Amino acid sequence: MSPNLLALLPEIILTVGGVLIMVAEPCLTPGGSRKPLGWLAILATLAAGAASIFQLGFTKSAAIFAFYGTIQVDPFSIFFHLLIAAIVLCSLLGSLDYFEGATNHAGEYFALVLFGAVGMMFMTSATELLMVFVGLEISSISTYIMAGFRKGQATSAESAIKYFLLGSFATAFFLYGIALAFGATGSTSIHAIAAGLAGTSTPTLAIAALTLIIIGLGFKVSAAPFHVWTPDVYQGAPAPVVGLMSTAPKAAAFAVLLRITYSAFGSMEARWTILLWILAALSMTVGNLGALLQTNVKRMLAYSSIANAGYLLVAFTASADRGIAAAAFYTATYAAMNVGAFAVITQVGGFNESTRTLADYTGLALRRPVLGALLSFFLLSMIGIPFTGGFFGKFYVFTATIHSGNVWLAVVGLLNSGVACFYYLRLIAALYTRRETAETSPVTSISFPAGLGLAATALATLMLGVLPGQILHLAGRASWSITSPSAARIGAAAETASR
Amino acid sequence: MQLALFIIFAALAVAGALNFLLQRHPINSALSLVVVMLSLAVLYWSLGAEFLAAAQVIVYSGAVMVLFVFVVMLLNAGEEERTTGSRAAYFAGIPGAAAVFCLLSFVFLSESKTLGSSNLGGYLNDGTVNIVEISKILFTRLLLPFEVTSILILVAILGAVVLARKEPDPKVVTSSTDAAGVIVIKEKV
């Protein structure tokens, strides 16, 4: 198989899947069930995941370079490809029944999810900033549209518009950063930028470029002070979409940030560490303090996701060998518990989201024990209780940063984790409190695919907390593919050879 | 000559941008944005980037501005206001513009020896033609981003369909296939 085809295999499979869904959609009876298309999307995602694992076998000695060095498939990109495929899979399982009968655009939804995944996968494997930009736009535009899928509700329209306007604003920052990086080094390729910066002493233009890129990506991962859109968008968007967009595009954006900071701007590590230190401390504090004030559960989880972006940014202040692995591992644990929590919210609320506030959730675990227990488990994982994925995620991030001498940031993070206990435990306590008023909402049973998705996320959260070895090993390999000196050399060589 | 062109069109761009901010009516703002875009195109051209200049005119002045004006018109921006400024522009606009044009042409032609001549477009770059270089990069090193942009456009089209199409109430409309195999859409009463 030609390296070009091999390197793009998962993306090609997903694109074909999305196009097939688009073609098949008009052939089904109008107003009929769109579940077959959902299953087709699930099949395509599974195939893409399998293709990523297939690629892993080819990257033992060296990365696969394709399209003149635009794409670099290495364990790092494969780690994030698999993570994105898993997130998309669980979200699709959770949303199969969600759109049934509620909207006529379920078919388009499944296609958009697949196309969005294509964009995110391109972001993680691209070593050309223009390719990153195109991938970022594909993933962003599909999430903007998905956020507005509850067309009857005003909050959903508000969510989509806010997300669109602020997201495009952020993309402009990112693009400007790319332009300045080109001005500083004469290239938009990550390896060429690294080579161009190696000899310079005071790269003023490069500092401006990196700052703008960090601002742009900071918006995308909702790090404070670029987080203002998050609560409104998460509140209005459909619950399964929030589960998807709070994890997969963020994982992709963090992958891009890891590649850009440690690989392209690696020679300026002392400078950007300070910047990310501040962002991390701010995000953790703003996120956790903001969450304390929320009564709407989705808004509370939105602030919690800001705080989690802060914990993740802590990993960036660590040295490359520990930091990248810790960040990669944390994205996986965060994805497992957050997709799970929003899958429960999807089941509880339904399309019209009748259950919103803390008061609505009171006594939920007594009426629906399985859902209540699962939500409590995911929330405990977000606190970071041992035997859950959240514990090891936080553990590796904080030990990595302490090893690099950033004790104060770790202290800030741990204090924040203490604050976070309060609002997570408040929700768990509410779940197990008996409600005074009589029960009105009918209890619907969990459908098979949604149950499968819930079980998968719960199992992933548990496994990451009990047996993290396999994922840690993969994260370590991912980190090695960026930090090893040979990676950059081979990348630069492939770049020049292709010219 | 290069300097003279730069000063004239840079001033025009700045004036257009200021006017864009100061105008109250959205259509007037949009039209002054066209002035900014076109002046920028001339500046690009005089810097030796003729491809960028052409793209600027086609994409910004053409597509983007038409879209802007369409949106402003569709949103029903309200009655056009007649201010003293607009009344003055109504009478003095075309003769004034013609007078400035004549004056500039006269100055350029009479002082052509002191101003010298200026090359426009890619001839500034020692014989390499910009468009050739751009197309080489676009179809070799940047082939993948170029191709993948098609997925981006596909997503945008899909989004436009989703957001713009009316959502019929799924409970009211049922569909079935009749004996001849034609899909029949019935409305429940």
Image: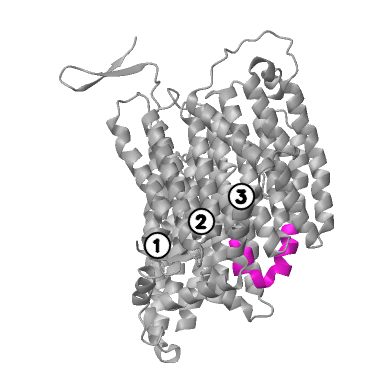
Label 2 sits on what residue type? Met
State the CA–CA distance, disc 3 to disc 2. 21 Å
**Which disc, if any, is residue B144?**
1
Q: Residue at x 44, y 53 (%)?
A: A54
Q: Is residue A221 visible?
A: no
Find disc 2 in the rendering and name its residue.
A123
Farthest residue, direction bottom: B113
Which label sits in the foreground, 3 or 2? Answer: 3
Q: Helix, strand or loop at disc 3?
A: helix
Q: Position of residue A465 (x, y in %)?
A: 68, 41
Badges 3 and 2, same chain:
yes
Residue A263 x/y as whole percent: 60, 67
The magenta stretch is: A259-277
Above/below status of B169 relative to B138? above
Residue occupying the point 83% across, 45% down: A415
- The answer to whether residue B116 of the structure is visible from this angle is yes
A38 relative to A378 in the view: left or right: left
Query: Quarter holding the N terminus of chain B?
Result: bottom left
Judging by the rendered image, the residue that carries numbered circle 3 is: A471
Are there few (<14), some (14-19), or many (20+) residues within 10 Å of tag 2? Answer: many
**On the picture, is A402 further left or further right than A217?**
right
Asked if the residue under mark 2 is in contact with the one under mark 3, i.e. CB atoms within 8 Å, the reply is no
The picture places residue A301, in percent across and down from the top left corner, at 67, 35
**Residue B154, how many percent across, how many down?**
37, 47
- Host chain of mark 3: A
Q: Cα distance, mark 1 to mark 2? A: 13 Å
Kindly indicate the quadrant of the structure image that contains residue A308: top right
